[in-house]
Image (tube, rainbow, N blue to C red):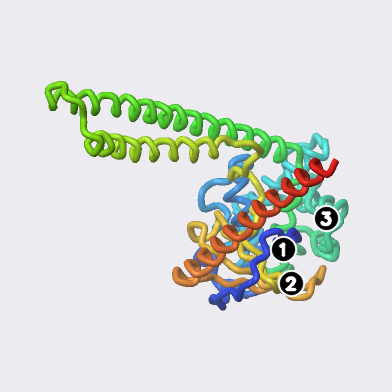
Amino acid sequence: MKHKDQNNNLDFKLPQGTEMTNVAGIDLSPKDVGNALQILEFCATFGEILGVKKGQAESVIRDIMGGRGTRRGKYSTVVQFHIQLLTLLQKDFGEETPSLSASEGKHCWLNALKSCLLESECHLKDFVKCINEGNNGYNTLDCSQKLRLLAFLCDETLGTMEVKSWIEDQNFKFIEKQKEEAKAKLAATQGKEKMMKQKLQDEIAKALLTNNGAPLTMLEHQSIVSKIKAEASKAHADMVETMGLVPRRKQRSDAMRTEPVLVDAKGNICWRLKGYNNSQMVLQVCGPEDPVTCNEKWFSFNAEEEKLIEKHLHLFRVKRTKRNKDGAVHEMEAVDSHSKLS
């Protein structure tokens, strides 16, 4: 799980957190946490298009870490999940082949996996030698290697036309839904604002009747107007806020690759993952980049630590918004000054 864009850089020291060695109730070595999280996040985001069932990803990781691999043949959750991913990849390659099989032979899923590795630009081609030996060869790979292979397949699947089309379709539906919700709320707040104006007229008429038609004193009139104005002002504020909800540009839906919450001054990345513990925030501490060895550690935060991060993140966003506004004002002033000089 990598990220190079650092637009959300936050210059403050993140809480230390607790190093992760367990994901979804599965004990893992620190080097395996990142791949396990990537697989869970992939299934949480794109599971619908693959027909991934609830709990399937956790079951696959549990079987890999338990060393079950392909030993249960066609009933292996590990093999079934590989076949789901590889079938989608083969379809994208335009290969019309019979259904992949868990058994040894021409249409064995391991042959499709080997082809995928050889055609990719990844650094996992050393695994091909083991995969050439069939199920027994695959089972010589350790748990970490199997997780890396599966995370690689998940990443490759994201580049298929079927997944891309699904993402576009989901984003379109998301935007349309946002527009409809915003318009409905806008109509409601506009109606409320009109009601407030009518209420002002009704309150004044009622007060006149109470005074037997005698004109209201200045104090009485101001009291009624102030009360209604306060209510109308709130209705107007709600309307303005709602107008801001109408999408002016493409917004993110759940059908998007996960983006980091923030990147600190050291380049460590904070994520909020849909596939982990009800979107709990986690920290990825990256070491020197190595194509073969995993040089990263993952940390989780408790409620207080998350609250602290959210507080600093809010302050950062407020400052960035103000800075952007100030920049826009200075730019307008510069243009205005240039126009006068011309």
Query: Which of 217/102 is in front?
Result: 217
Looking at the picture, which amino acid does disc 1 mark? Arg
Q: Which residue is mark 2?
A: 294
Q: Position of residue 301 (x, y in %)?
A: 51, 71
Three-letter residue code for mark 3: Leu
Residue 79 shows up from this direction: no
State how many labels appear.
Answer: 3
Residue picked out by circle 3: 117
Residue contact at pointers 2 and 1, CB within 8 angstroms: yes
Q: Give how far across and how far down residue 323 sits, in percent.
A: 65, 57
Amino acid on which the number 2 mark rests in the picture:
Cys
Question: Sequence order check: which comes first, mark 3 or mark 2?
Answer: 3
Residue at the (67%, 45%) spot, across then down? 84
Q: Earlier in the sequence, mark 1 or mark 3?
A: 3
Q: Residues within 10 Å of mark 2 (few under 14, many from 20)?
A: some
Q: Is residue 122 visible?
A: yes
Residue holding disc 1: 148
* Residue 298, numbered circle: none
User: Which callout, 3 or 2, points to the residue nearer the camera?
Assistant: 2
From the viewer's perspective, tell me whether residue 157 is left or right of residue 256. right
Residue plotted at (74% across, 72% down): 294
Looking at the rendered structure, the secondary structure element under dot 1 is: helix
Residue plotted at (21% across, 33% down):
217
Q: Secondary structure at mark 3?
A: helix
Distance between mark 2 and mark 1 Cα atoms? 10 Å
- What is the x, y in percent for residue 225? 30, 35
Could you tell which of marks 2 and 1 lies nearer the N-terminus?
Answer: 1
Q: Quadrant of residue 304?
A: bottom left
Q: Residues within 10 Å of mark 1 (few under 14, many from 20)?
A: some
